[in-house]
Amino acid sequence: MRHVHKYKLYNDKGEILFKSKKAESIEECFLEAVKNKVNLQGVVLENASFNGITLYNIDLSEAVFRNCGFDDSDIENCQLNNCLFVDSFIQHSRINNCNFNGGVLENLNRNEFNDNRFVKAQINHAESNEFNGNLIEWTEIRGVFNHNNIEPSKQLLPENRIKGAGEVDLKFVNAKYGYNNKFSDLTLFFKCNKSTFETSTFNCCSIERFEISDSKFSKNEFHRCEFNESSLDIRNSYFEDNEFKLGNAEQIMKELSSNNNKQINNKTFNDEKSADARKVEKIKEFAEPYSPGM
């Protein structure tokens, strides 16, 4: 009796990567290939929907997911370099320790991204996601970090390093999310509403939009950042212990003195000498005194 392969997986050249005799759907075919450790680099998957699956230590580089969905899934230790998500989505899932170099992700909704690496990638239409401890370089991000009734201890954007010349469009609404982030060499569009952002550094950024309302903004440091003065809009917010070094932050200080804002101990430094002096002052402040014989 001749076996008929009902479902097959192809790459973008039309070559067969895997064919199944028992799968009853393209989803089952894909998961069977994963289970059998088939090389799925460059696979093209269309019109597939996955719920509650686990992908671990799989190389899906150059893969194309077209009109596909991943819901409540776990993706860990995977290579997703130059991977394209076209008219697809990932939602309510956990993505940990993966490489997304040169790829395109879109329609991300309420996921957790932990300890991943994004280099020369694109992240489009990201809403209500948690990013924690990721390395994000030369990557365009367009997204919304928007959580209502969030747990007080939950952070949406903690301890990430975000670097690159691509545009980064971040909007934060009703979220306690930001601490110990590092932004550098970016074109940044920044909007913060009813949220908290603190202890982060911005280095050599072109900040095209800076809108802060009903928020707390404290202990952040801006170094050599240029603000688009026509786009500044700061109102009903609390600014404390922020430092602006070697940029055009004078207009921000003017904004802080109006629009029902409260500001405490914010500083500007307009030359290297004063900025370096402040750095030495900080070192002295936190250094423990030397005691001979200890």
Image (tube, rainbow, N blue to C red):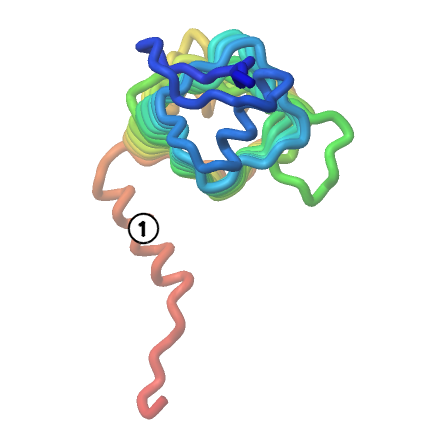
**Residue 63 horizontal/vertical position (percent):** 40, 20
Determine which residue is flagged by label 1: 279
Question: Residue at the location (46% across, 19% down)?
Answer: 105
**Residue 278 in sight in this render:** yes
**Residue 168 horizontal/vertical position (percent):** 42, 19
Q: Look at label 1 and name its amino acid.
A: Lys
**Residue 219 horizontal/vertical position (percent):** 50, 42
Quadrant (top left, top right, bottom left, bottom right) of the C terminus: bottom left
Question: Residue at the location (35% across, 84% down)?
Answer: 291
Q: What is the crowding at mark 1: few (fewer than 14 residues within 10 Å), some, or many (at least 20)?
A: few
Q: Is residue 288 above or below residue 44?
A: below
Please, which residue is most extreme toward the bottom here? 293
Query: Which quadrant of the structure image shows residue 128?
Result: top right
**Residue 123 horizontal/vertical position (percent):** 45, 19
Query: Which quadrant of the structure image shows residue 204?
Result: top left
Element carrying mark 1: helix
Nearer to the camera, 110 or 149: 110
Please, which residue is most extreme toward the right here? 149
Q: Is residue 251 left or right of residue 55?
A: left
Query: Which quadrant of the structure image shows residue 141?
Result: top left
Quadrant (top left, top right, bottom left, bottom right) of the N terminus: top right
Question: Residue at the location (54% across, 14% down)?
Answer: 4
